[in-house]
């Protein structure tokens, strides 16, 4: 199994576990919102309103997580050579003031961090400014904000 395939399996496992946790939290929030005990006792009691807002927010997170799980179920990550321009699916190493940071350019689950071979890899999506800055760059190119040097692409 290639290193990127193994990484993709870890991401899928992480996203599935996250979806399970969020689904349970959404069920709990819905139960709290519909529980007769959360009914307002006075016009100033906002427990039921707060519980319904929480349930709504939890349901949205479940939708987003389920979408990410679906996208990653069929996602494959292309291999890049060191002189290839960075594009979707690239695993990029950036030297930020002597510290290496690793990023994987993916379609969903931005901000999620995965431990892989002793390094932390952060998932970046097109909504990220850093994702957009990296597109088309190559090893040896520098980026601003954060100030860094691209040292590896896989």
Image (cartoon, rainbow, N blue to C red):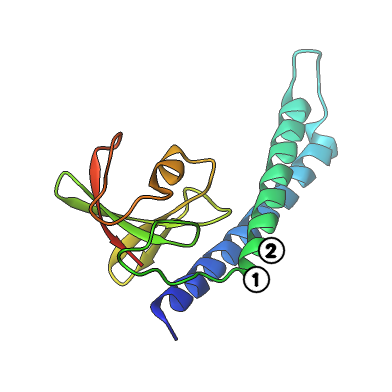
Front residue of this view, candidates 16 and 9: 9
Q: Quadrant of the N terminus?
A: bottom left
Point out the residue furthest to the top here: 43
Vertical placement of residue 61 versus 116, above or below? above
Which element type, helix, strand or loop, lies under badge 2? helix
Which label is found at residue 70?
2
* Residues at marks 1 and 2 touching, judged by CB atoms closer than 8 Å: yes
Q: Is residue 5 left or right of residue 40?
A: left
Q: Is residue 99 left or right of residue 69?
A: left
Q: Is residue 69 left or right of residue 139?
A: right
Q: CA distance from mark 1 to mark 2?
A: 7 Å
Vertical placement of residue 34 versus 89, above or below? above
Q: Residue 115: x and y, percent?
A: 37, 65
Q: Residue 152: x and y, percent?
A: 27, 61
Point out the residue furthest to the left here: 98
For the point 45% across and 77% down, the residue is 6
For the point 18% across and 51% down, the residue is 99
For the point 44% across and 46% down, the residue is 131
Q: Examine the image and state in which quarter residue 24 appears.
A: bottom right
Mark 1 or 2, which is nearer the eye?
Answer: 1
Front residue of this view, candidates 65 and 101: 101
Q: Residue 42: x and y, percent?
A: 81, 16
Q: Quadrant of the C terminus?
A: bottom left
Crowdedness of circle 1 by 10 Å Cα count: few (<14), some, many (20+)?
few
Front residue of this view, candidates 149 and 115: 149
Which residue position is annotated with label 1? 74
Q: Residue 58: x and y, percent?
A: 69, 43
For the point 29% across and 37% down, the residue is 146
Crowdedness of circle 2 by 10 Å Cα count: few (<14), some, many (20+)?
some
Vertical placement of residue 96 versus 79, above or below? above
């Amino acid at each position: 199994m290639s290193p990127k395939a193994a990484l993709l399996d870890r991401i899928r496992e992480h996203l599935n576990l996250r979806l399970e946790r969020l689904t349970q939290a959404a069920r709990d929030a819905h139960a709290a919102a519909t529980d007769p005990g959360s009914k307002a006792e006075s016009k100033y009691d906002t427990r039921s309103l707060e519980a319904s807002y929480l349930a709504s927010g939890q349901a949205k997170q479940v939708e987003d997580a389920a979408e990410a799980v679906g996208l990653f179920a069929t996602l494959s990550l292309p291999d890049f050579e060191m002189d290839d321009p960075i594009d979707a699916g690239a695993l990029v190493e950036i030297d930020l003031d002597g510290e290496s940071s690793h990023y994987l350019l993916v379609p969903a689950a931005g901000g999620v961090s995965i431990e892989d071979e002793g390094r932390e890899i952060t998932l970046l999506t097109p909504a990220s400014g850093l994702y957009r800055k990296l597109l088309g760059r190559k090893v040896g190119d520098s980026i601003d904000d954060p100030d860094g040097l691209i040292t590896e692409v896989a």
